[in-house]
Image (tube, rainbow, N blue to C red):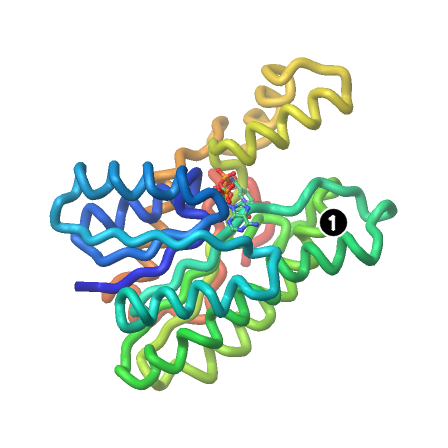
Amino acid sequence: MTRVVVGGASSGLGLAIAEGFAASGAELLLWARNRDRLEETAERLRVEHPAATVHVAAADASCPAAAEQIAGAATALMGGADVLILNAGGPPPCPPDRTDAQGWRSALQLLTVTPIDLATRLLPGMRAQGWGRVVAVLSSGVREPLPELAYSNGARSALTAWLKTISATVASDGVTVNGVLPGRIDTARVAALDAGRAEREGRSVAEVRAASAAAIPAGRYGEPREFAAVALFLASEAGSYVTGSFLSCDGGQARGTW
Ligand SMILES: NC(=O)c1ccc[n+]([C@@H]2O[C@H](COP(=O)([O-])OP(=O)(O)OC[C@H]3O[C@@H](n4cnc5c(N)ncnc54)[C@H](OP(=O)(O)O)[C@@H]3O)[C@@H](O)[C@H]2O)c1
């Protein structure tokens, strides 16, 4: 049974990825901050996918202790992890001329230090067994920085650089390390960002959403299951020769060729 650790697993992209693994009968450790919501998610997955085994652990990725807590839970409950999905919530929107040192410290802990620390703790087990997958949920802002998301652009870019670096270190051990860059996938986080933008610009949420969708070649926001399909491929045996890659899942929104 494949042992999978999924962060931010009670909503949106993490939840869709967890659902995909549960459907394949995996053993899962779901983590996020709110334990009640995690327990509800786990119970639903157990009922819908009886072949799956689902554990939960509550931790806050913006706390320095989170990686140790989650790696410890993965070891205690599953004996380690074969697949690690690096994902949690996003930082608050902030234009680049309004960031401050405390905001950077928080964003870097949430989006850079905790995922690197967690992967560093779980990678030795993957390398020792000669098989493993790390897939990070990143953002289109890594490729094309988003004006209102300065913390996200910067902290996720630092994580991406580390992922690329470690991918070469572990490749010969049968471990792949990749990232998926969502554009606008229809989740609670994107709804909140749209609502914030509507308020700032004195427009309705429907207007903001229609303008965003019109800027996407596909003409619509993505579904979480469409995003999860990319992550599931990268985490599969079929993805064995893809490593150090950062794939957009954005309906064609990124205009560059890489
Ligand atoms: N959806 C998109 O199109 C899109 C685009 C670019 C980037 N992203 C990024 O992708 C990630 C997932 O986004 P989403 O759209 O799936 O968001 P979402 O629907 O709001 O889900 C976020 C998940 O992460 C958990 N979480 C939030 N803060 C956390 C923290 N500090 N520590 C641990 N878990 C935390 C949440 O549960 P709790 O609240 O219980 O912790 C929830 O399970 C975010 O980093 C987001 O910024 C998404």
Report the quarter where the N terminus lies.
Answer: bottom left
Query: Residue 202 or 77: which is nearer the viewer?
Result: 77
Q: On screen, 66 above or below 16? A: below
| Horizontal arrangement in the rendering, residue 67 relative to residue 109 (left or right) | left
Amino acid type for the residue under numbered disc 1: Ala
**Count of labels shown?**
1
- Image location of residue 150, percent across then percent down: 74, 49
| Horizontal arrangement in the rendering, residue 115 relative to residue 62 (left or right) | left
Q: On screen, 45 above or below 57? A: above
Specify the farthest residue to the right. Answer: 97
| Horizontal arrangement in the rendering, residue 103 relative to residue 253 (left or right) | right
Query: Residue 119 or 157: which is nearer the viewer?
Result: 119
Q: On screen, 148 above or below 54? A: above
- Image location of residue 182, percent across then percent down: 50, 45
Q: Which quadrant holds residue 48?
A: top left
Residue at position x 57%, y 72% from top? 162
Residue at position x 53%, y 36% from top? 184
Q: On screen, 99 above or below 178? A: above
- Image location of residue 21, percent across then percent down: 26, 51
Residue at position x 75%, y 57% from top? 104
- Image location of residue 204, percent across then percent down: 66, 14
Query: Residue 53 or 185: which is nearer the viewer?
Result: 53
User: For disc 1, does the CB lie below 8 Å from ligand 1?
Assistant: no
Q: Secondary structure at mark 1?
A: helix
- Tell me the crowding category of disc 1: few under 14, some 14 to 19, or many 20 or more residues within 10 angstroms, Cα based: many
Q: Which quadrant holds residue 70?
A: bottom left
User: Which residue position is annotated with label 1?
Assistant: 150
